[in-house]
Amino acid sequence: MQILNVTWKWNVPNALSVLRILLVPVFLLLYLSRMDQWAFGVLVLSGVTDMLDGIIARRFNQITDCGKLLDPLSDKLTQVAVVIALATRYQELLPLAVLCFVKELCQAIGGAIMLKRQSAVRGSKWFGKVSTVVFYASMSALVLFDLSGLFRWLLVALAGSCMLVAFVGYLRIFVEVSREGKPVSSETEKG
C-alpha cells in the first residue's frame, strides 16, 4: 500500500511502533485515573518497544520508509500525551509541554513538506534519540515518584534542554535540505 509517497510495509519493528501508538490512550487513562504505577509500566513498555523496534530493524535489515515515519510519529504522540498529562498535576511542566507541542508540530509540518516534495524519508538522528531517552527517563521518574519541586524543575530543565537541542538540530537539517535540495550527510537511521 502506498500513502504519502511511502510504501507501507508491515514487519515486527513497524508493528512495535503501532503498538506504541495504541499505548498512548492506555497511558492517559491510567495516569489521569491516578493509577501511577500502571501508567509507569505502560511508559516503560513504550520505551522498551521503542528501543526494540530500532534494534530489530537494524539487526534484521528491516529498515523501511514506513518505519522511518511510524517510529517518530509514535514518539511524538507519546511525548506530547505524557507531558500534557503530567502538566495537569505539575505546573512546572507547562513550559515543557508548550516546547514539546511546538517542536513536534513543527517537525510534523516539516516532514509533511519534505514528503510532498518527494524528498527521501530520513530517520531519527543521534540528538533526537538522546532527547527521547532523556524524556522517557525524566517523565518516568515524575510518574513513579512524588518528587519535590526542585527535582521536578531539574528534570524539566534537563528534558527541555535536550528537546531544544533536538529541535534546533532537526530545524538545521530541514533548512539545509530545503536550500540545497540534496540530502544531508547520512547517519544511522532508525526504522
Image: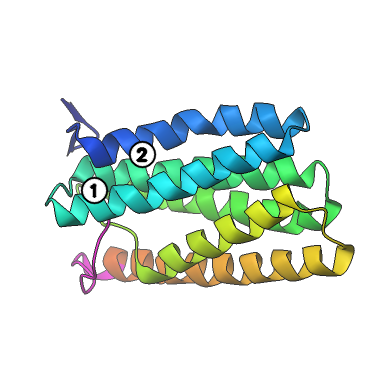
Image mark for residue 17: 2
- Residue depicted at 82% across the width and 53% down the height: 146
Q: Residue furthest left?
A: 61
Q: Which mark is residue 117?
A: 1
Residue 36 numbered tag: none
> Which residue is depicted at the point 61% across and 49% down?
101
- Judge whether 104 appears above or below 158 on screen: above
- From the top left corner, tell me how far across and down residue 112 is, in percent: 35, 44
**Which residues make up the magenta segment?**
179-190
Q: Residue at x 65, y 32 (%)?
A: 28
Q: Picture coordinates of residue 89 (x, y %)?
A: 83, 44
| Left or right, 15 with reference to 134 | left
**Dominant secondary-structure state across the stretch colored magenta:** loop
Res. 22 in view: yes
The answer to whether any part of residue 120 appears in the image is no
The front one of 168 and 60 is 60
Label 1 vs label 2, nearer the camera? 2
The alpha-carbon separation of the residues under discs 1 and 2 comes to 25 Å
Q: Amino acid at mark 1?
A: Arg
The N terminus, quarter of image: top left
Q: Position of residue 17 (x, y in %)?
A: 36, 39
Query: Dot 2: what SS?
Result: helix
Q: Is residue 102 above or below residue 78?
A: below
Its colouring scheme is rainbow
Asked if residue 108 lies left or right of residue 134, the reply is: left
Magenta region includes residue 185: yes
Magenta segment: does it hold 6? no
Name the residue: 56% across, 43% down. Answer: 43
Q: Secondary structure at mark 1?
A: loop
Badge 1 density bin: few <14, some 14–19, many ≥20, Cα 10 Å: few
